[in-house]
Amino acid sequence: MEKLYTATVTVVGGRDGQAKSSDGIFETELRKPMELGGQGGAPNPEQLFAAAWGACYLGALSSVAEHDGVDVSNANVNVHISFNKDGNAFALSADLDVHIPQISIEEAQQLAVKAHRACPYSKATRGNIEVRVTAV
């Protein structure tokens, strides 16, 4: 595998800390959400993961759709990352709701699944967390 780019982010303080990229472009406070007993008011790891996965997924959708001759320039994806209790441990799950205007829901579902197969974030989570991809 040939590395094309490596992002480096330093995190201090965990869920109630700070994150900063090595190039200084990205810097944010982190806060545990109120639903998990935190104070909220700042991004949390699940939100950051959802944003990153959504951006990558739309890139993959664009690539597979272009191959199929479909315009997805107005598509969007709502990525829901859930923090779940699984017995005595915790686990993530994901729902990707994909909206592709101007095509049928059946065609949108086929493209959504193709994009899920191609997306590097989807590949990284495959078999590790429960994921649902649905055209809406």
Image (cartoon, helix red, strand yellow):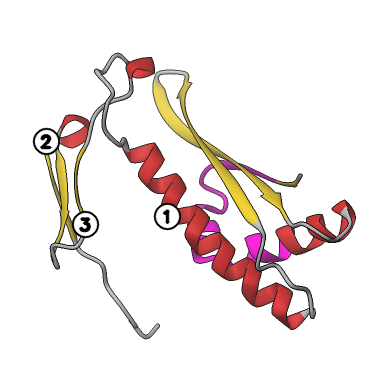
For residue 39, above or below residue 75: above
Q: From the viewer's perspective, tell me whether residue 34 is left or right of residue 96.
A: left
Is residue 22 found inside the magenta-colored segment of the image?
no
The residue mark sitting in front, 2 or 3, is 3
Alpha carbon distance from label 2 to label 3 = 17 Å
The tag earlier along the polypeptide, 2 or 3, is 2
Q: From the viewer's perspective, tell me whether residue 79 is left or right of residue 104.
A: left
- Say which residue label 1 marks: 52
Q: Nearer the viewer, residue 2 or 68?
A: 68
CB under 8 Å between discs 2 and 1: no
Magenta span: 113-133
Q: Which of the numbered marks, if any, corresponds to residue 119? A: none
- Say which residue label 3 marks: 26
- For disc 3, the neighbor class at 10 Å (few under 14, some 14 to 19, many from 20) is few
Residue sitting at x 80%, y 55%: 109
The tag earlier along the polypeptide, 1 or 3, is 3
The residue mark sitting in front, 2 or 1, is 1
Q: Nearer the viewer, residue 86 or 119?
A: 119
**Which element is circle 2 on?**
loop
Q: Position of residue 129 (x, y in %)?
A: 53, 42
